[in-house]
Image (cartoon, grey):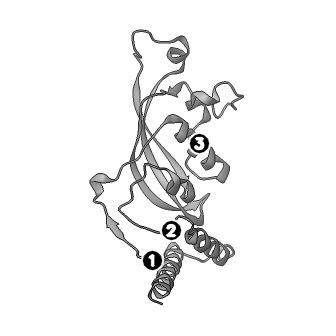
Amino acid sequence: MQINYRIQTHEYNYLVVTPQVLNRLNETAIEKGYNRSLRRGLFKENLNGELTMEDVTDRIILDGIPIQCILAMPHYHKMGKLTMPHVRASFSVPTVELTEYTNGAPDGYKTLEWMQVTIDIDGDEWENIPTVRPYAWLDIPESSNYEKAIYEEAQEKFKDDAKATIEQVEDYLAEAEKNFFRSLRETEEE
């Protein structure tokens, strides 16, 4: 098996999602207890359900307009504690006042406002978004789930270690990945 390394420059890195995808990512952030999530009332899919007072908003995200990620960075804490890496991402979203949205706007939305919102996205979810274009990636067989195994090993290793630092977790993950590719290369050479 040959491993091909392909590098893309930063101008080709982009992420555009629909409000429905952003809503799904937000639901996962809420379920996982991440620090950054959005109020459910921002999404039209949630208007018919029962919203808590904390989730009610006076604005709603417009459908049919692409939502662009404007910043994404790795993040390692959840509720003040070190956790497995995830992505903190900021998006530019088109919103209008809820009353204007529910009444309809035949002449266009007069309250249109682009807002910047930030959510934490689970690492597995991030990797599965089809429009993510990383700076560099490897051609690895589709059936390989080595990353999941590495993260599970790291989770087990550091789960009870209150003194573990981000640097230690990153070093462990980097070394485990190097070992995986080293063994893959050795297998290839045989």
The residue type indicated by label 1 comes to Met
Give the x, y percent position of residue 49.
70, 28
For residue 104, above or below residue 2: above
> Measured along the vertical axis of the image, is residue 57 above or below residue 127?
above
Of the numbered discs in the image, which one, if any, rests on residue 1?
1
Placement of 7 over or under 128, stated as above or below: below
Q: Residue furthest top?
A: 106
Closest to the camera, between mark 2 and mark 3, is 2
In the rendered structure, the answer to whether residue 68 lies left or right of residue 159 reads: left
User: Which amino acid, by three-letter code, is at mark 2?
Assistant: Pro
Residue under label 2: 141
Instruction: First in sequence, mark 2 or 3: give its number.
Output: 3
Asked whether the residues under the numbered discs 2 and 1 touch, taking CB atoms below 8 Å apart as contact, a structural biologist would say: yes
Q: Earlier in the sequence, mark 1 or mark 3?
A: 1
Farthest residue in the bottom direction?
190
- Quarter of the image holding residue 68? top left
Query: Residue at 39% across / 59% down in the picture?
Result: 134
**What's the distance in space between the residues labelled 2 and 3, CA to CA?**
27 Å
Q: For numbered disc 2, what is the local secondary structure?
A: loop
Examine the rendering and report whether any part of residue 162 can be seen.
no
Q: Position of residue 188 (x, y in %)?
A: 46, 84
Q: Position of residue 19 (x, y in %)?
A: 51, 35
Element at label 1:
loop
The residue wearing badge 3 is 24
Q: Position of residue 85 (x, y in %)?
A: 54, 64
Q: First in sequence, mark 2 or 1: give its number.
A: 1
Q: Badge 3, how many Cα within 10 Å: few under 14, some, many 20+?
A: few
Can residue 166 be seen by looking at this rendering?
yes
- Residue located at (47% from left, 69% from top): 140
